[in-house]
Amino acid sequence: MKIHSFILIVEGVDIHEQDVFDALYEAGCDDALVATTNGIQHLDFGREAASLYEAISSAIADAESVDGLRVVRIADPDLVSMSEIAARIGRSRECVRLWVNGKRGPGGFPAPLNNPHDRYRFWRWSDVEGWLRGVLGGEPWSAEDHLRAAINAALELRHHFRQLDPRDRPDLRALAGPVLAG
């Protein structure tokens, strides 16, 4: 068994209320630090489990067994700015800016996740890393990184699915296929 570290971002009830705090402990979240940073409630886990998936999925189930608490996402090390990209690969921000703008390198840098006209743009590290691997070489993204990204995508889809008009849900089920079955 290995200890897996991750942070769940949660919404709903105030996790610092004594009864909620106690309920989290009783639900099995005794391996989590309960905290709020910059107004964002989160549970920092060090969970022992056979696999990362088992650790994360059991933590989500435990946290969501507390009335009024919803897990929104795993704190995402996958979302990066140009500065973060530069820091991760040991290059200058200017170098990354030139890649982004197609003025250096082979072109085809991944599109940002937000509006490209926004002052601050963000990319998915897995997309950038794949592009960089083609340009600079290197090891592929780890299976655990892909798993975290996939769990986040599922949590995001679950959140938006609940907000849909029920008449639109069949269309989304058809688009997403078996992911939303059931």
Image (cartoon, grey):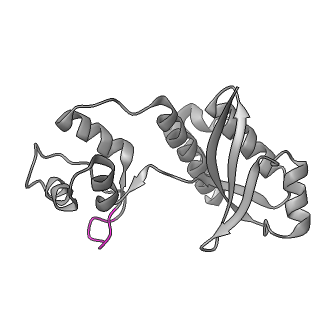
How far from the left and from the top, in percent, is residue 154?
Answer: 58, 44
| x, y percent for residue 99 | 16, 53
60 lies left or right of 67: left
For the record, the magenta segment spans: 115-121
**Main SS, magenta residues:** loop
How many circles with numbers are drawn on the protein?
A: 0
Residue at image location 29% in from the left, 73% down from the top: 119
Q: Decide if residue 147 is in sight here.
A: yes
Q: Residue furthest toward the front?
A: 90
- x then y, percent, for residue 118: 30, 71
11 within the magenta span: no
Q: Quadrant of the N terminus?
A: top right
Above or below — where is 119 with respect to 93? below
Give the camera-side residue of 16 and 149: 16
Residue at 58 percent across and 35 percent down: it is 179
The residue depicted at 58 percent of the width and 31 percent of the height is 178
- Considering only vertical position in the picture, is 106 above or below 134? below
On the image, which quarter does residue 71 sit in?
bottom right
Residue 182 visible at all: no
